[in-house]
Structure formats: C-alpha cells, structure tokens
Amino acid sequence: MKCNYAHVLLALLVLPGTVVFSHADTNLSAGLDQFLTPPPAREARLHGPLVYGVRPGSPLLYRIPCTGERPVEFRAEHLPPGLTLNPTNGILTGEIQQPGDYPVTLFARNARGGDQRNFCIKVGDQLALTPPMGWNSWYIHFSHVTEATMRHAADAMIASGMADFGYQYVNIDDGWNIKPGNKNSPADLPTRDAEGHLLPNKNFPDIQGMVDYLHGRGLKAGIYISPGPTTCAGFAGSRGHEAADARTFAGWGFDFLKYDWCSYGDHASTKTLDYFQQPYRVMSAELKKQPRDLVFNLCQYGMADVWQWGGEMGQCWRTTGDLGNEHDTDLPGFYHIAFRNAKLSAYARPGAWNDPDYLLLGWVGGSHGSHPTTLTRNEQYSYMSLWALMAAPLIFSGDMDRLDAFTLNVLCNAEVIDVDQDTLGRQGRIFRQTADEYVLVRQLADGSRAVGLFNLSGQTRTVAVPLGELGLAGHPIVRDLWRQQNLGPCNGLLTAEVTPHGVQLLRVQTQNH
Ligand code: GAL
C-alpha cells in the first residue's frame, strides 16, 4: 500500500475568510485559500529551541517564545541561581558563573490553557546551539538604515507575533557609521573619536539607547562591519582597530556581529588559506575577550571553503554570494543558492551553521521602496522549507512595516521552525536531485526525519520516495508540517502531488521511536 497525499491537500485548505493571525494585514486583497499554516491556538503554547548556549558570566537575555492569548503567566522550575524570569513578559535574564548543563522546565498559562517544555541552558563556550533567528536591515533599508527603523523593526517583531515564534535578533547591516567622503558625512568628518572609537553616523544619534530599547523588549541587537578599510557600501571598516571595535560593540551591548569581507581583499598580496582566515581569526579572538556573548557571522561568500574552518572562529558563515543578486529566468534564485548550500550539509553542527543568506519573502526592498516579492506563494513555502531543512539561520530581510498575513503565514509556522531549530543540529542531506525534483532529508533529534519533496518543474507533479531508502522501516506516522496535520500511517512509499516550484514538507516518525 502506498499513501498518496494529493487528495488531502484540498481538504486541508484554510477556509476563505478564516482569520490567519491577528496582525495588521496590508495585503488583504490576496485570497486566503492558499494559506497553509493554521492559525495559532488560543491556549498558551511554548515554542523556540530546546537548548540555549551562553558563556559563564555573560549576560543571558531570552524572551521565551510563546503564542496564545494574552495575558500569559510564565513560570520556570529548576532555574539556576543567577537567573530571573519575569512572569508577565516571559523574559529570562541574569548570568550563570559555573559551566555545565542546566535543565529547566518552562511553563506558560493563559485563561484558555497551558503548556510546558524542557529547556536546557548549556553554560560553556558554545553559542548559537540552534541557528540564529531574526531580521536584518540590508535588503529593505540598504545603507539608509536609521536607529528609528531599527527600533521600529523591534516593535514590529513583537507586535506581529514573530518574536512569539522565536525570532529575536534585530540586526543592523551596512550603513550605520561614517562613510569617508560621502556628501552627508564629508571626508573631513572623522570616522573615529580621539581614542579610536568608531563613530555612528547622524542616523544613529543614540546607538546605546537603541540597543537598550531592544534589550528591554527581550530582543537582541546585531551590528555589521568589515575587516578592510571600508565596508561594502564604503563606510568605515575595522582594519587596524579590531580590538577597539570589538570593545565598542560589546560596550554598546551588541549580541551579534556580521563581519563582511569586501575591501579586505584590496590589500591582498598572496592568497593563502591563512590570508582568508586571518581577519576572522583576529576578530574572533577579540570577541571572545568581551564580557558578553556576540554571535559571529562570517560573511565572505564561501571563499577558501569557509565551511571547513568557519566553525573554529564563529557560529555561522555565508556559503554563497548575495541571494538578492541571484537571478534566473526559470527557477527562482533561492533554489540555486539552496542547491549549493545543501551540498555542504556535512559541515553544519550545533554552534556552527552554513548560512545561505536571508529570507527574502513578502514585501522586499527595491530602489523605490518596498514591493511584493515576485515569488509565488508556493515558492515562498519552498524557500522557508529549504532553509528549515538546511538548518539555516532564519533571518528575514523584508519590510517589517508590511508583514502581511501571508508573509507571517510563511515565517511563523512553529512546526516548520522546529525543524530548523532541532537540537541534533544536523543539516538535511540531498536525497535526490534531478531536473524536475529535489528531495532533502533531515534527521531530527527524536529519531524522525523531515523530508522536503520539491517540484522544480513548471507543472504539478507527483514526487515519490520509497521509505526504505530513507532508512525508515515499519508503518511510520507522517505529518504534513505546513498544514500541521497527521496524514496517517504509510506503507512503502511517500508520495505527494506537489505544485510547480512548490513543496510538500513532511515529518516521518517510525512508531517504535
Ligand atoms: C554584501 C553582503 C550583504 C550586505 C552588503 C552590504 O557583501 O553580502 O549581505 O551586507 O554587503 O553592503
């Protein structure tokens, strides 16, 4: 017997008129019949990773992701000394001095019901035990980013509900400091003060206040610079000031640094492996000296097989060029980026992730403000599925002012995010790649497999995978993760009718697990 899931697709469509999330919807003209993620339950439901890494003595800040009607009351059992949980907003703060594993039980309750889950705080030298989740300013504000837009993005991350699913980093990209020779900041304007501290530009009049504002909401703050004399957009870089800049970033309270190669290469004489590693090694060492944790994102587009050594220096490394520049007449660019990134699955592990670049979904940036993506809805579900299967950082880089109901439907499916954040930290492997089909399989901590059946062709197509070839025996339970529905036991063959460029994302669990 085989189970063909095509017939269930129709039955599982969300009924027209169903309210999908309660967020402000700027794109209601779009029909609701293609929304896959069901609305979140009204009861309190806990989400987010099951593990969290922090260094001894570093400030810990974690806003417990939780959906459901407010007010929600939070509680924790076995909290180690040094940590405090705010019962009203679910923000965990404090610091733990002694290395070790601290298993905690988290509870959340509202008027409709409650939830609990285990959460292990691992105090040691590893950060980002699951891929970072958040938002980055680049593809929407480019180098016109301002402090006000960052504060606003943080507000939107909370108001939209994204933070309730685990999005927490609010990251400034290029354009926050002084650009030597720019008309807004003329060449005679110093890029550093007399002591050598980097100076923000006029769009960031109170950068420390901005970071405090983010932290006050339980969110984390990210910043950007280059190891060369200038950044990619021509703003001042860190070259020769790495120690001071690491101190400055930590002093302002940042939690994340993207270090973008760009002009570093202009100073190259020889191109040894050491030459490629050197700038990252230097900054990594400086970050480790700081009294707070900064996740280090190596951005050098995959040069010198960075996946082989990036994990010695940071927590994630870009594997390819800019996704926004990846164009194709047939398959959208994100597929091509995924094809390259997926080949590197062997290198991903907890605290060390392949980074195929940002989630460009929903309303994205252009030279005249933001516009809806040209990707179809099916393609956007595929994009998110690929990133989850590849254990990629989930960093949205679209318009936080236009988080319409569909965009949130793609970004905020707790079961899809659980695949991305799975504790085992194993990136999905390529099971099949033909001109028309792409299948990724990811092993998960509970013994189940996440399976993405992708249709690369322009016509609806049946994609089938023999269970035996996935290493799964018996009569596994198969769950459709986008629709959050069990599809019933399955014998022999996983098969689904998949829309053009679309996906069927399944979790397959053998019953003896
Ligand atoms: C590119 C980088 C982008 C963005 C941009 C800023 O090199 O890949 O993600 O940071 O620079 O100028």
Image: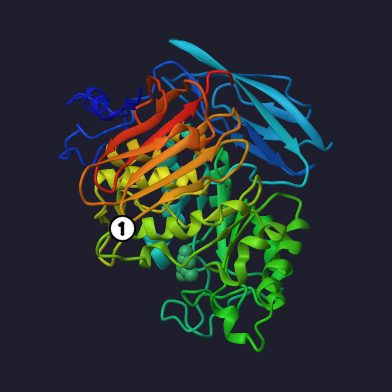
Residue 230 position within the rendered picture, expressed as x and y whole percent measured from the top left: 55, 78
Residue 202 position within the rendered picture, expressed as x and y whole percent measured from the top left: 48, 67
Q: How is the rendered protein coloured?
A: rainbow
Name the residue rendered at 27%, 57% in the picture: 370
Relative to 504, residue 234 above or below: below
Q: Is residue 252 left or right of residue 42?
A: right
Q: In this view, does 241 lie to the left or right of 185?
A: right
Name the residue rendered at 78%, 58% in the picture: 289
Q: In this view, does 370 lie to the left or right of 81?
A: left
Label 1, on which residue? 332
Which residue extends farthest right?
A: 98
Q: Is mark 1 on a helix, strand or loop?
A: loop
Residue 444 position within the rendered picture, expressed as x and y whole percent measured from the top left: 57, 34
Please name whichever residue, 391 or 296, is drawn nearer the observer in this view of the structure: 391
Relative to 387, residue 468 above or below: above
Mark 1 within 8 Å of ligand 1, using the beta carbon: no
In which quadrant will I find the C terminus? Answer: top right
Does residue 401 appear in the picture of this structure? yes
Q: Is residue 400 left or right of residue 250?
A: left
Which residue extends farthest bottom?
A: 269
Q: Which amino acid does label 1 sit on?
A: Pro
Counting other residues with Cα less than 10 Å from the Cα at mark 1, is it few (<14), some (14-19), or many (20 or more)? Answer: some
Name the residue rendered at 26%, 24% in the picture: 8
Residue 358 position within the rendered picture, expressed as x and y whole percent measured from the top left: 44, 55
Please name whichever residue, 25 or 40, is drawn nearer the observer in this view of the structure: 40
Q: Quadrant of residue 339?
A: bottom left
Does residue 166 appear in the picture of this structure? no
Please name whichever residue, 235 or 478, is drawn nearer the observer in this view of the structure: 478
Relative to 91, residue 486 above or below: above
Count the numbered circles shown.
1
